[in-house]
Amino acid sequence: MYFRDIIKNRILITGANGKLGQRTVSFYKNFKNFELLTISIEDEPVIDGVDYLQCDITDREKVKKVVFDYCPDFIINTAAYTNVDKSETDREAAWKVNVKAVEYLSESARVIDAHIIHISSDYLFDGKSGPYSENAVPNPLGYYGRTKLASENALRLSGCYYTILRTNVLYGNAADSSPDFVKWVINSLKNGEKIKIVTDQINNPTFVDDLVQGINKIIEFGKTGVYNIGGREFISRYDFTMLIADYFHLSKSLVGKIITEQLKQPARRPLKSGLITLKAETELGYHPHTILEALAEMREGLAL
Protein backbone atom coordinates (compact mmCIF):
# COMPACT_ATOMS: atom_id res chain seq x y z
CA MET A 1 0.00 0.00 0.00
CA TYR A 2 1.21 3.49 -0.82
CA PHE A 3 0.98 6.19 1.87
CA ARG A 4 1.32 9.69 0.43
CA ASP A 5 2.09 11.14 3.86
CA ILE A 6 5.12 8.85 4.28
CA ILE A 7 6.58 8.83 0.77
CA LYS A 8 7.03 12.42 -0.37
CA ASN A 9 7.59 11.88 -4.08
CA ARG A 10 7.17 9.24 -6.74
CA ILE A 11 9.89 9.14 -9.36
CA LEU A 12 9.67 7.46 -12.76
CA ILE A 13 13.06 6.87 -14.44
CA THR A 14 13.12 6.10 -18.16
CA GLY A 15 16.12 4.45 -19.81
CA ALA A 16 16.91 2.83 -16.46
CA ASN A 17 19.36 0.31 -17.94
CA GLY A 18 21.63 2.91 -19.56
CA LYS A 19 24.69 4.44 -17.91
CA LEU A 20 22.93 7.53 -16.57
CA GLY A 21 19.79 5.55 -15.81
CA GLN A 22 21.69 3.01 -13.73
CA ARG A 23 23.51 5.65 -11.73
CA THR A 24 20.25 7.55 -11.13
CA VAL A 25 18.46 4.39 -10.01
CA SER A 26 21.35 3.48 -7.69
CA PHE A 27 21.23 6.95 -6.17
CA TYR A 28 17.49 6.93 -5.43
CA LYS A 29 16.78 3.29 -4.66
CA ASN A 30 17.55 3.54 -0.94
CA PHE A 31 15.96 6.94 -0.29
CA LYS A 32 13.04 6.45 2.10
CA ASN A 33 11.24 9.62 1.03
CA PHE A 34 10.96 8.48 -2.61
CA GLU A 35 9.04 5.73 -4.33
CA LEU A 36 10.71 4.54 -7.51
CA LEU A 37 9.53 2.96 -10.76
CA THR A 38 12.10 2.24 -13.46
CA ILE A 39 11.45 1.49 -17.12
CA SER A 40 13.57 0.59 -20.10
CA ILE A 41 13.15 -1.21 -23.43
CA GLU A 42 14.90 -4.39 -22.22
CA ASP A 43 12.95 -7.27 -20.69
CA GLU A 44 14.91 -7.30 -17.43
CA PRO A 45 16.46 -4.58 -15.24
CA VAL A 46 20.20 -4.23 -14.74
CA ILE A 47 19.76 -3.16 -11.12
CA ASP A 48 17.93 -5.49 -8.77
CA GLY A 49 15.70 -4.47 -5.91
CA VAL A 50 13.63 -1.83 -7.69
CA ASP A 51 10.24 -1.90 -9.38
CA TYR A 52 10.77 -2.30 -13.11
CA LEU A 53 8.61 -2.43 -16.21
CA GLN A 54 9.60 -3.14 -19.79
CA CYS A 55 8.40 -0.18 -21.84
CA ASP A 56 9.17 1.19 -25.29
CA ILE A 57 8.77 4.93 -24.77
CA THR A 58 8.25 5.45 -28.50
CA ASP A 59 4.87 3.71 -28.04
CA ARG A 60 2.45 6.46 -27.08
CA GLU A 61 -0.19 4.21 -25.52
CA LYS A 62 2.36 2.32 -23.41
CA VAL A 63 3.79 5.60 -22.15
CA LYS A 64 0.34 6.88 -21.20
CA LYS A 65 -0.49 3.67 -19.35
CA VAL A 66 2.74 3.67 -17.34
CA VAL A 67 2.47 7.35 -16.42
CA PHE A 68 -1.24 7.29 -15.58
CA ASP A 69 -1.03 4.02 -13.62
CA TYR A 70 1.95 5.15 -11.57
CA CYS A 71 1.16 8.88 -11.36
CA PRO A 72 4.73 10.09 -10.68
CA ASP A 73 5.63 13.48 -9.26
CA PHE A 74 8.86 13.50 -11.30
CA ILE A 75 9.79 11.84 -14.58
CA ILE A 76 13.56 11.63 -15.10
CA ASN A 77 14.09 10.98 -18.79
CA THR A 78 17.52 9.42 -19.18
CA ALA A 79 16.54 7.50 -22.33
CA ALA A 80 18.10 8.73 -25.57
CA TYR A 81 19.38 7.75 -28.98
CA THR A 82 22.99 8.85 -28.58
CA ASN A 83 24.82 7.42 -31.61
CA VAL A 84 25.78 10.70 -33.25
CA ASP A 85 27.03 9.23 -36.53
CA LYS A 86 24.28 6.65 -36.92
CA SER A 87 21.70 9.39 -36.36
CA GLU A 88 22.62 10.77 -39.79
CA THR A 89 21.25 7.67 -41.53
CA ASP A 90 18.91 6.13 -38.94
CA ARG A 91 16.94 9.32 -38.67
CA GLU A 92 13.54 7.80 -38.01
CA ALA A 93 14.76 5.87 -34.97
CA ALA A 94 16.67 8.87 -33.61
CA TRP A 95 13.61 11.11 -34.00
CA LYS A 96 11.29 8.61 -32.35
CA VAL A 97 13.45 8.19 -29.25
CA ASN A 98 14.75 11.73 -28.87
CA VAL A 99 11.67 13.71 -29.90
CA LYS A 100 8.43 11.71 -30.18
CA ALA A 101 9.04 9.91 -26.87
CA VAL A 102 9.54 13.27 -25.16
CA GLU A 103 6.27 14.48 -26.66
CA TYR A 104 4.46 11.40 -25.32
CA LEU A 105 5.98 11.77 -21.86
CA SER A 106 5.13 15.47 -21.71
CA GLU A 107 1.55 14.89 -22.88
CA SER A 108 1.00 12.47 -20.02
CA ALA A 109 2.94 14.58 -17.52
CA ARG A 110 0.79 17.62 -18.25
CA VAL A 111 -2.40 15.75 -17.34
CA ILE A 112 -1.14 14.74 -13.89
CA ASP A 113 1.08 17.79 -13.20
CA ALA A 114 4.26 15.73 -13.20
CA HIS A 115 7.60 17.47 -13.55
CA ILE A 116 9.87 16.17 -16.34
CA ILE A 117 13.65 16.35 -15.99
CA HIS A 118 15.10 15.87 -19.47
CA ILE A 119 18.72 15.44 -20.55
CA SER A 120 19.98 17.46 -23.50
CA SER A 121 23.38 18.09 -25.08
CA ASP A 122 26.01 20.62 -26.15
CA TYR A 123 25.46 19.26 -29.69
CA LEU A 124 22.76 21.92 -29.89
CA PHE A 125 25.58 24.31 -30.77
CA ASP A 126 27.92 24.69 -33.73
CA GLY A 127 31.11 24.86 -31.64
CA LYS A 128 32.32 28.14 -33.08
CA SER A 129 32.20 30.23 -29.92
CA GLY A 130 31.96 27.95 -26.90
CA PRO A 131 31.78 27.40 -24.05
CA TYR A 132 28.06 28.12 -23.99
CA SER A 133 25.67 29.52 -21.41
CA GLU A 134 22.02 28.53 -21.11
CA ASN A 135 21.07 31.63 -23.13
CA ALA A 136 23.26 30.86 -26.15
CA VAL A 137 21.44 30.51 -29.47
CA PRO A 138 21.40 26.88 -30.72
CA ASN A 139 22.72 26.02 -34.16
CA PRO A 140 23.16 22.23 -34.40
CA LEU A 141 25.55 20.87 -37.01
CA GLY A 142 24.07 17.38 -37.35
CA TYR A 143 20.87 15.41 -37.07
CA TYR A 144 21.51 14.26 -33.49
CA GLY A 145 21.79 17.87 -32.38
CA ARG A 146 18.62 18.71 -34.28
CA THR A 147 16.73 15.99 -32.42
CA LYS A 148 17.93 17.29 -29.06
CA LEU A 149 16.89 20.83 -29.98
CA ALA A 150 13.50 19.52 -31.12
CA SER A 151 13.09 17.67 -27.82
CA GLU A 152 13.70 20.90 -25.91
CA ASN A 153 11.17 22.72 -28.07
CA ALA A 154 8.64 19.93 -27.54
CA LEU A 155 8.90 20.47 -23.79
CA ARG A 156 8.58 24.23 -24.12
CA LEU A 157 5.37 23.80 -26.10
CA SER A 158 3.95 21.02 -23.94
CA GLY A 159 2.51 23.03 -21.07
CA CYS A 160 4.03 20.67 -18.49
CA TYR A 161 6.53 21.42 -15.74
CA TYR A 162 9.98 20.72 -17.11
CA THR A 163 13.68 21.14 -16.50
CA ILE A 164 16.26 20.65 -19.24
CA LEU A 165 19.76 19.65 -18.17
CA ARG A 166 22.33 20.10 -20.92
CA THR A 167 25.51 18.06 -20.59
CA ASN A 168 28.50 16.86 -22.60
CA VAL A 169 31.02 13.96 -22.84
CA LEU A 170 29.43 11.84 -20.13
CA TYR A 171 31.70 9.30 -18.45
CA GLY A 172 31.66 7.04 -15.40
CA ASN A 173 31.10 3.52 -14.15
CA ALA A 174 27.95 1.52 -14.88
CA ALA A 175 27.41 -2.19 -15.37
CA ASP A 176 26.45 -3.59 -18.77
CA SER A 177 26.65 -0.25 -20.55
CA SER A 178 28.57 0.53 -23.70
CA PRO A 179 32.09 1.89 -23.06
CA ASP A 180 32.32 5.66 -22.74
CA PHE A 181 35.35 7.66 -23.86
CA VAL A 182 37.30 7.04 -20.66
CA LYS A 183 36.76 3.29 -20.69
CA TRP A 184 37.53 3.11 -24.41
CA VAL A 185 40.85 4.87 -23.85
CA ILE A 186 41.71 2.62 -20.90
CA ASN A 187 40.80 -0.60 -22.71
CA SER A 188 42.63 0.42 -25.89
CA LEU A 189 45.86 1.36 -24.13
CA LYS A 190 45.74 -1.68 -21.82
CA ASN A 191 45.55 -3.86 -24.94
CA GLY A 192 48.53 -2.10 -26.49
CA GLU A 193 46.45 -0.54 -29.26
CA LYS A 194 47.52 2.70 -30.90
CA ILE A 195 44.79 5.34 -30.84
CA LYS A 196 44.47 8.71 -32.54
CA ILE A 197 42.76 11.43 -30.57
CA VAL A 198 41.51 14.80 -31.82
CA THR A 199 43.26 17.91 -30.56
CA ASP A 200 40.63 20.38 -31.77
CA GLN A 201 37.53 19.32 -29.81
CA ILE A 202 37.23 21.16 -26.49
CA ASN A 203 34.59 20.33 -23.86
CA ASN A 204 34.19 20.08 -20.10
CA PRO A 205 33.63 16.31 -19.70
CA THR A 206 30.89 15.39 -17.25
CA PHE A 207 31.26 12.71 -14.58
CA VAL A 208 27.99 10.78 -14.58
CA ASP A 209 27.56 11.06 -10.81
CA ASP A 210 27.79 14.84 -11.12
CA LEU A 211 24.87 14.77 -13.54
CA VAL A 212 22.93 12.66 -11.03
CA GLN A 213 23.79 15.31 -8.43
CA GLY A 214 22.35 17.94 -10.77
CA ILE A 215 19.15 15.94 -11.24
CA ASN A 216 18.73 15.60 -7.50
CA LYS A 217 19.30 19.32 -6.96
CA ILE A 218 16.48 20.07 -9.43
CA ILE A 219 14.14 17.84 -7.41
CA GLU A 220 15.37 19.24 -4.10
CA PHE A 221 14.82 22.87 -5.09
CA GLY A 222 11.92 22.33 -7.51
CA LYS A 223 13.65 24.28 -10.27
CA THR A 224 12.33 24.52 -13.84
CA GLY A 225 13.95 25.86 -17.00
CA VAL A 226 17.38 25.14 -18.49
CA TYR A 227 20.60 24.36 -16.62
CA ASN A 228 24.05 23.39 -17.85
CA ILE A 229 25.66 20.47 -16.05
CA GLY A 230 29.30 19.81 -16.90
CA GLY A 231 32.73 19.19 -15.49
CA ARG A 232 35.07 21.68 -13.87
CA GLU A 233 37.80 21.68 -16.54
CA PHE A 234 37.59 22.73 -20.17
CA ILE A 235 40.01 20.49 -22.00
CA SER A 236 40.76 19.09 -25.45
CA ARG A 237 39.93 15.47 -26.09
CA TYR A 238 43.66 14.79 -26.58
CA ASP A 239 44.65 16.36 -23.26
CA PHE A 240 41.81 14.47 -21.57
CA THR A 241 43.27 11.24 -22.97
CA MET A 242 46.73 12.10 -21.66
CA LEU A 243 45.29 12.72 -18.19
CA ILE A 244 43.60 9.30 -18.30
CA ALA A 245 46.80 7.60 -19.44
CA ASP A 246 48.83 9.34 -16.74
CA TYR A 247 46.41 8.50 -13.96
CA PHE A 248 46.11 4.81 -14.83
CA HIS A 249 49.83 4.45 -15.69
CA LEU A 250 49.18 3.55 -19.31
CA SER A 251 51.47 4.16 -22.27
CA LYS A 252 51.10 7.66 -23.66
CA SER A 253 53.34 6.68 -26.57
CA LEU A 254 50.36 4.81 -28.04
CA VAL A 255 48.37 8.05 -28.30
CA GLY A 256 48.68 9.97 -31.55
CA LYS A 257 47.27 13.36 -32.54
CA ILE A 258 44.69 14.01 -35.23
CA ILE A 259 42.19 16.73 -36.08
CA THR A 260 38.46 16.11 -36.42
CA GLU A 261 38.35 16.73 -40.16
CA GLN A 262 40.75 13.85 -40.74
CA LEU A 263 38.37 11.35 -39.16
CA LYS A 264 35.84 11.73 -41.99
CA GLN A 265 32.96 11.01 -39.62
CA PRO A 266 29.38 11.03 -41.01
CA ALA A 267 28.28 13.68 -38.48
CA ARG A 268 30.00 17.01 -37.97
CA ARG A 269 31.11 17.79 -34.43
CA PRO A 270 31.13 21.10 -32.55
CA LEU A 271 34.79 21.89 -31.89
CA LYS A 272 35.10 24.78 -29.45
CA SER A 273 32.25 23.70 -27.21
CA GLY A 274 31.55 22.91 -23.56
CA LEU A 275 28.97 24.28 -21.15
CA ILE A 276 29.24 27.09 -18.60
CA THR A 277 27.82 25.81 -15.28
CA LEU A 278 27.72 29.06 -13.29
CA LYS A 279 23.90 29.07 -13.15
CA ALA A 280 23.80 25.55 -11.69
CA GLU A 281 26.56 26.37 -9.24
CA THR A 282 24.86 29.51 -7.93
CA GLU A 283 21.20 28.43 -8.01
CA LEU A 284 21.54 24.73 -7.22
CA GLY A 285 24.78 24.50 -5.25
CA TYR A 286 26.19 22.24 -7.95
CA HIS A 287 29.80 21.19 -7.29
CA PRO A 288 31.36 18.97 -9.97
CA HIS A 289 34.34 16.69 -9.45
CA THR A 290 37.66 17.49 -11.03
CA ILE A 291 38.69 14.97 -13.69
CA LEU A 292 41.27 13.43 -11.37
CA GLU A 293 38.71 13.11 -8.57
CA ALA A 294 36.30 11.42 -10.97
CA LEU A 295 38.98 9.04 -12.25
CA ALA A 296 39.79 8.13 -8.64
CA GLU A 297 36.16 7.18 -8.05
CA MET A 298 36.06 5.23 -11.31
CA ARG A 299 39.19 3.28 -10.38
CA GLU A 300 37.31 1.44 -7.62
CA GLY A 301 34.92 -0.06 -10.17
CA LEU A 302 37.51 -0.94 -12.81
CA ALA A 303 39.57 -4.11 -12.96
CA LEU A 304 42.99 -2.45 -13.18
Image (cartoon, grey):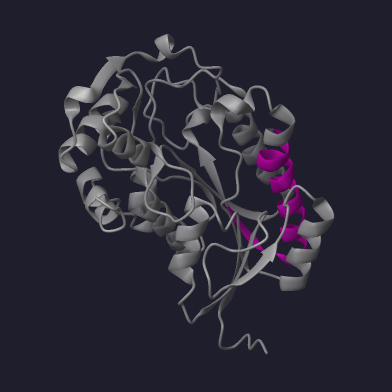
* Image position, residue 167 (x, y; %): 45, 41
Location of residue 98 by image quarter: top right
- Read off the magenta span: 95-117
The reply to whether residue 153 is in sight is: yes
- The residue sitting at the right extreme is 61
Residue drawn at (55%, 79%), measured in percent from left and top? 8
Q: Is residue 101 magenta?
A: yes
Quarter of the image that includes the N terminus: bottom right
**Residue at x-position 25% and y-position 53%:** 299
Main SS category, magenta section: helix
Counting the numbered discs, the total is 0
- Please tell me which residue lies in front, 152 or 59: 59
Seen in the image, is 236 located left or right of residue 151?
left
- State the residue lying farthest toward the front: 191
Instruction: Please say whether residue 205 is visible from this viewpoint.
Output: no
Q: Is residue 201 magenta?
A: no
Compared with 194, 213 (above or below) is below
- As drawn, 132 above or below 171: above
Where does the image place residue 93, in percent across and percent down from the top left? 71, 35
Task: Please state the horizontal and vertical placement of residue 149, each as a whole percent of the image.
Answer: 61, 33
Q: Is residue 106 found left or right of 193 in the rendered image?
A: right
